[in-house]
Amino acid sequence: MHASGPADADPRAPVRVPYGLMPGLPLTIWKLVTIDLWKLLILTSAVLVGVISFAVTIGPLSDGELAPIDAIRFMLFAAVPMLAYALPFAAGFAATLIFHRMSQDNELLAAHAGGVSHGRILVPAVVTGLVLSVIVGFMSDQIIPRFLRNMELLITEDVAKLMISRLERGETIEFGGNSIYADTVQWFDPTKLKSITDAKDGFRLHRAAFASLDNDKRMKAGFSSEDAYIVIRQASDSNRGSGSIVTLVAENYNSWGDGYNFESSDRLRYDFAVPGAFRDDPKYWSFGELKELKKNPKLLAQVWEWHKKTAYRAATLAMLQDLHRNLQSNGSAELPLADGGRIVIHGGKLGALEWLSRPILPRRQGEPIVVERYSDDGRVSRFVAQSAVFNADKAESEEVAAEHVTAKIVLEEVTTGSIQSGEGEEVTGRRRMQTITGVLASEGMDLVGAYERMSLAELLTETGFETGVGRALGEAQWTADKKERELQREIVSKTHQRLAMSAACFVMVLIGATMAMKLRDALPLTVYLWAFIPALSSILVISTGEQFAQQVGWPGLLLMWGSVAGLLVYAGVTYKQVALR
């Protein structure tokens, strides 16, 4: 006799497989579960995206900002950004229904009895979650920013032209603290205005009125003119936030303000920066663009505007200081004019700074201020005033659009005269107030461009940040520094928010599948609520963490990733309970 062993086993006897430890891979189960999961995922996503996109379109359509045919295009553009928000919840819903059906039909029990563990059963959900997290991350980085731009560009393809269309309808338009009205609007060839060389489009305003508004929307100054012109100098494009530069030109205008009202035959010119067609926000930027933005914050219009205001105000103060030195040392100062002429100011010095204006003081008490204006056609005008103010104040929108420092001289109690060659002076009139506009800085003292090209750190150092530089410049310096620091935090928070949303998408699929396996005897809606409410809470905490990170920095990031970690722990505990059955 010999001992029996494995070699003596009957080959026809059934193979005993350890419970839940089937050798090999259950490819058939994975295939069928994956197909069912993706079918329901696509259907659910389509329904959610359709509903959300329609809801987003209702507002612009009801406000008249979209034509009916454009509303369809807008919905298609909105579908892609909305997909990033719908996918995580659609995936969680699909995983819940598929695995709950398998659990109720005892398919999971049969598979487990056949040696397929719960962990292997969840492989399709794990792979689906990973794929979706990559898709959501890629969409957030590359696709969604582009579609968000197209959505808003479709509503307002060119803000400047929309302004013109409102004027044509007889409406008053307001922007950047300014208000414009005209009886009629007609297109004209902008190349006819020789003083503006980069014009893209032009419109003639008949019986136009312009007003500058204060913070309470009250009119503080303005002018009216029989004929004025609006020139769009830079067409709106996809360069973030650049918008259009609108130039308003008027001749033979009547100007008014607090305590004055006068007519002038001078040419009046105002430049305004009109917002671009989509709101300037880092959410429109990809990861690569955010990295570049972190190095060069001036790429964002919100930061660049205050950088430009700081540069303009610093250059203005430099111009005022140069004028003050010339008056003190020479008793006169010569400055060029925007129309090609020049002026010579006779005085003693400049008085105390008030925002961006300083009074011109005489050399001796009681003497008048004399200003001589030399036109490029040879005419010479002489203004003798009892008082004068050199004023470089501008609306903030004008500061952003300005390429050079420009100022005006406001003369009070003025005697005007003309000087004829060899014939002396001829008095031509007297008026209570006279304004000379378009005064430029002397050669070499227009520092707007030089300051604008500096980084903010260089500009703040050059212009004496926190050294008592005056209220106007100090406000611009402080705000520019604040905006840049906020932007740096926003870039970090936006980057982490996108990554956290992608990670949450992965975990939401796992929660839906494991919760369905745990609550096999409950209704599908009840099961989904147990998965949906924690997932929704996590999304809300991620959004709150992003806002918190923008304000205080790293504590917001901890809150953001803590919510994802909490969601992952919730999924792990649920799976552990299922695996122990």
Image: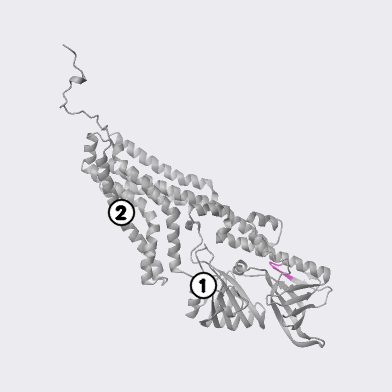
**Is 73 located above or below residue 546 in the figure?**
below
Q: Earlier in the sequence, mark 1 or mark 2?
A: 2
**Amino acid under label 1?**
Ala
Relative image position of residue 237 (x, y in whole percent):
50, 66
Region rendered in magenta: 354-358
Q: Quadrant of the C terminus?
A: top left
- Could one spot residue 472 in this view of the protein? no
Magenta span has 230?
no
Based on the displayed image, in which of its 4 quarters is residue 427 positioned? bottom right
Residue indicated by mark 1: 160
Say few, some or many: other residues with alpha carbon within 10 Å of mark 2 (under 14 / 14 to 19 / 20 or more): some
The rendered magenta stretch, by its main secondary structure, is classed as loop
Magenta-span inclusion, residue 356: yes
Q: Quick check: 571 above or below 443?
A: above
The disc placed on residue 42 is: 2
Q: From where the camera sits, is residue 95 visible?
A: yes
User: Helix, strand or loop at disc 1?
Assistant: helix
Task: For the residues labelled 1 and 2, say whether their Cβ atoms are less than 8 Å apart.
Answer: no
Q: Is residue 544 above or below residue 10?
A: below
Q: Is residue 91 above or below residue 326?
A: above
Relative placement, left or right, of 441 versus 87 is: right
